[in-house]
Amino acid sequence: MVELKNFIYRGFSAEYDDLMKMPIRRFGSINKLVVDPDVSCRYIIQEHSCDLPIDFVYIPGSGNRLLVGFHGAEMRKIADLPKFQFVGSLRSRTEPFVSFADSTLLKNEKLSIGWYAGDSLFDLSRNIAEVIRKIEKVLNFTKTILMGHSAGGLAAIAIGMQIPNSHAISVNGQTIAGIHRPWVIKNLYNSAFPELSSSEEMLERYPDRFDIRRMSSDRSSGATFTLFSHKDDPLSFSEYPHFPLLSEYFGLGSEGGLTEFGDALVPCRWETLNPSAHALPGTVLPFLQATLGEAVGVPITYDFVLPSR
C-alpha cells in the first residue's frame, strides 16, 4: 500500500468504515472489481504497491441513472480522509450513488487539492472513469451524472469527458487548473510530479487532467457538462477568471450559453449559508435539480433555459 506520511487515512487496513457505517471490500484490479448493487459498501482498488488507491463508496438505489460525487479542497489539519462528498445530500434521492475520494492527497500531508490527477505513474482520473464505465455496464445504468464543487467540479468534468453519454455538473469549478493560487499548484507539483522540471511542465504535459479546453476536444461521444458559476465569486470571474476564459474558448459571451456540443455555461447567483459566493448553498441538490428540469429547492437565478438532460 502507499506509504502514509504522518497522517491518518481512515480504514486504510480495516474491514469496516466506522464513519460511513459500511464494510470495506478490496480488489487488486479494476478487472476483478465486483460491486454488490444492493449493499452500501466502500471499495478500495489497488493493483500495485506503487499505485494510489481508487477509493469509493457505493450506496444502492433504484432506476437506471447513476449519480457520482467528487470533493474539492480539504483543510489537512482537520480533514478526516478519505472524503466522500455529497453522501448526506444525495441520500434523499432514489438513484444509486457513488462518491470517490481523491487519493492524490496521499502524496503529501500538506496537499489540499489534487484535482484527482494522481501522479506521473498513475492517472487517477482515467482509472476512476474506467471504474465508472464498468459499474455502468455491469449494473445496467444508461445515464451517469457526475457532480463536484470547486476542484471537485473540474474533476467531475475531467472524468465525465471520458464516459460516453454522461453529464457532469460543476459548481464554481476551476476550468484551467493552472489559473489558481500559485502555492496550490506548486504544492501539487512538488508532491505528485517532482520528477518534472517545474509546475509549468506538469500543466503542459498533462492538459487532459488540468484543462477543460483540452478535455473537451477529446471527449467521449455524447459527454456533456453544465458549469454553474456565481457571478460574485472572485474565484470564478475576477481574481481567477475561470468562467470567462472557458466561455471565450467556446465562442460565447460573458453571459454564457450553450456550446456546439450541448454543454451549458451558466453565470448565475444563489444564496449561500456563509458569506462566500464560492460556497455551495449547503448542498449540491439544487444544481442537480435544475439540470434535470426538476423543482429547485434553493432558487438559482440565471438568464436562459437549460436543456433537458
Image: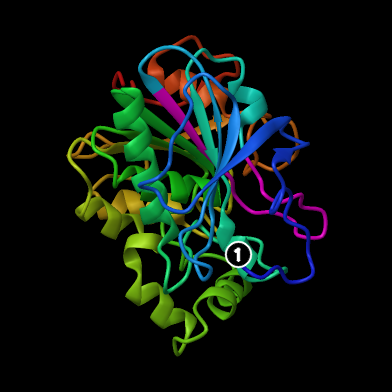
Q: Quadrant of residue 181?
A: bottom right
Viewer-nearest residue: 225 or 82: 82
Q: At which x and y percent is residue 114?
A: 55, 61
* Residue found at the very far top of the displayed protein: 295
Horizontal arrangement in the rendering, residue 125 relative to residue 248 (left or right): right
Q: Eyeballing the image, is 246 above or below 85? A: below
For numbered disc 1, what is the local secondary structure? loop
Viewer-nearest residue: 233 or 157: 157
Residue type at mark 1: give it: Met
Label 1 environment density (alpha carbons within 10 Å; few <14, some 14–19, many ≥20): few
Q: Residue at left 46%, top 32%? A: 35
Q: At which x and y percent is residue 148?
A: 51, 40
Which image quarter is the C terminus in? Answer: top left
Q: Residue at left 48%, top 64%? A: 118
Q: Quadrant of residue 120?
A: bottom left
Q: At which x and y percent is residue 149?
A: 55, 42
Horizontal arrangement in the rendering, residue 103 relative to residue 250 (left or right): right
Total marks shown come to 1
* Residue found at the very far right of the displayed protein: 78
Q: Which residues are magenta?
A: 66-84
Residue to which mark 1 is pinned: 1
